[in-house]
Image (spheres, rainbow, N blue to C red):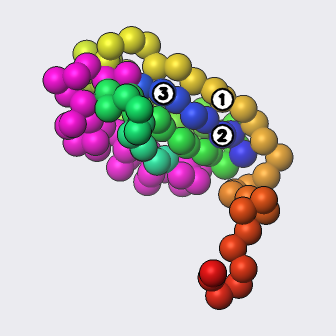
Amino acid sequence: MIFITAKFRVRPEYADRWPQIADDFTRATRAEPGCLWFDWSRSLDDPTEYVLVEAFRDDEAGAAHVQSAHFRAAQRDLPPHLVETPRIVNVTVPQEGWSELGEMAVPEGGL
């Protein structure tokens, strides 16, 4: 699976509306057959920073994503709302989904 985390620093005047600004891109990407997840979070320390955690089934799915019409539209439409070029970590990992964080295991049935 291709696992990607990207940080987007949004211009302050757009920060509260970023989820709506990125909504078409987000929905179209989530609908891709090879997309495993595509989730935005807002930083607790910096209200202008959003973190995108995304995963794609394999290289083929990742290639389809960056070649899609909605990706090209995002390349055109999203940067004017940003302070700087997003930063990214992009790795291929030998698994197909989330693993449990054993160090914080919750007993069956809860606490």
Q: Which residue is mark 3?
A: 7
What residue is drawn where x is 43% and y is 13%?
85
Dot 1, crowdedness within 10 Å: few (<14), some or many (≥20)? few
74 versus 79 height, above or below: below
Task: Specify the amino acid type for callout 3.
Answer: Lys
Q: CA distance from mark 1 to mark 2?
A: 6 Å
Residue 62 figure quarter: top right
Q: CA distance from mark 3 to mark 2?
A: 14 Å
Task: Specify the amino acid type for callout 2.
Answer: Phe
- The mark lying in front, picked from 3 and 1, is 3
Instruction: Kindly identify which numbered label has been placed on residue 3.
Output: 2
93 versus 9 height, above or below: below
Q: Dot 3: what SS?
A: strand
What residue is drawn where x is 31% and y is 18%?
82
Q: Dot 2: what SS?
A: strand
**Is 31 or 94 nearer to us in this picture?**
94
Q: Earlier in the sequence, mark 3 or mark 1?
A: 3
- The mark lying in front, picked from 3 and 2, is 3
Instruction: Give percent across and percent down for residue 2.
Output: 68, 39
Magenta span contains residue 93:
no
Task: Specify the amino acid type for callout 1.
Answer: Asn
Instruction: Give percent across and percent down for residue 95.
Output: 79, 52
Instruction: Give percent across and percent down for residue 39.
Output: 46, 48
Residue 90 in sight from this viewpoint: yes
Q: Which residue is mark 1?
A: 90
Magenta part of the protein: which range?
Answer: 9-37
14 versus 39 height, above or below: above
